[in-house]
Image: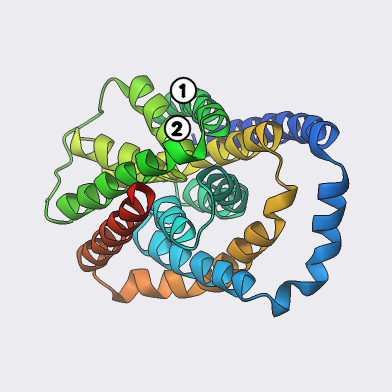
Amino acid sequence: MLHRLRRHWTTYSLLAVLASAGLLHLAGTLHLGETARQALLATSGWTSDPLFWTFIAIGFMAQIIDGALGMAYGVTANTALMSAGVPPAAASAGIHLAEIFTTGASGLAHLKFGNIDRQLFKRLVIPGVLGGIAGAAVLAFVDVSIIKPVVSAYLLLMGIYILLKARQQLADRGQPKRIAPLAFLGGALDSIGGGGWGPVVTTSLIGRGGAPRTVIGSVNAAEFFLSVAGAASFAVFIGVFEQLELIAGLVIGGMVAAPLAAWTTRYLPARALMTVVGLLISGLSIWNLYKALA
């Protein structure tokens, strides 16, 4: 069974990489120009830019939280990025590109330890990817002044949702049903809000009775393909060259935090951390919503 899972994972990964390579080539054709060249030349001055270090700190914080909870990287990073003044589409694009690294490693780890339910994984991937592409299209073509308060309101609801989940003791009751609509919704909200796949899909499936170990493993494995599809979609719709500094900061911060996140998972109670995260996301979202509507 494990051998077959590895074979399917390899096949899906190759297809995802090939598809994303084609889309990124198209994105380069559409967007590569003076703006891209200027962005590449500007990389030498990043270390003196306080914003670059802010992105590193946000990536570090989000990865610590995600490593300890198995969710909330995107929600945490997007809330913080929007608080720093990053537009919703740019924030979500940068997050999805950075998550390719973290979700790929996470999926391989879950595969190694036998935490992936092959049937559940297959039922999550396609509708999740389609939802992610749809969400990226919506975010790319809707006016920022309209979408920003909507995203802030959504993130506020996610913060409250995480707080409620932190108070619940969920039982293992068997295989959940109606997975495809949930995966599509989770993928769409993940692109629009810069995060939400884990909080929406993982908590919903466990709440419906899914075994926590295989739900977390399968959802994390599927998220790699969602991240690839989302990043490629944003590259086509809006370009990614203007977000190079943001992406690099998130990746560096996340890579530094990864081993510390494992330590955090071992010693910090998950329920306490979920409560802190829920309060942080809710507070920042209320502030972002106030600024957007003021």
Left-right relation of 203 to 24 = left
Colour convention: rainbow
Contact (CB < 8 A) between labels 1 and 2? yes
Direction from residue 55 to residue 15 in the image, left or right: right
Report the disc number at residue 187: 2
Residue 255 picture location, percent across and down: 59, 67
Tell me how far mark 1 sits from mark 2, CA to CA.
8 Å
Q: Is residue 190 visible?
A: no
Residue 153, image x, y percentages: 30, 43
The structure residue drawn at horizontal position 43% and vertical position 43%, both measured from the top left corner, is 148
Determine whether the residue tagged by mark 2 lies in a helix, strand or loop.
Answer: helix
The residue pinned by badge 1 equals: 127
Q: Using the rendered image of the protein, determine whether residue 66 is visible from the camera's viewpoint.
A: yes
- Identify the residue at image location x=45%, y=69%: 61
The residue under the point 38% across, 21% down is: 180
Residue reaching furthest front? 294
Amino acid type, mark 1:
Pro
Q: Which mark is residue 224?
A: none
At label 2, which amino acid type do we have? Gly
Secondary structure of residue under mark 1? helix
Left or right: residue 228 compared with residue 203: right
Nearest the camera: 60 or 89?
A: 89
Residue at the spot 76% in from the left edge and 36% down from the top edge: 24
Neighbor class of circle 1 (other Cα within 10 Å; few <14, some 14-19, many 20+) is many
Counting from the top left corner in percent of width and height, residue 72 is at 38, 53
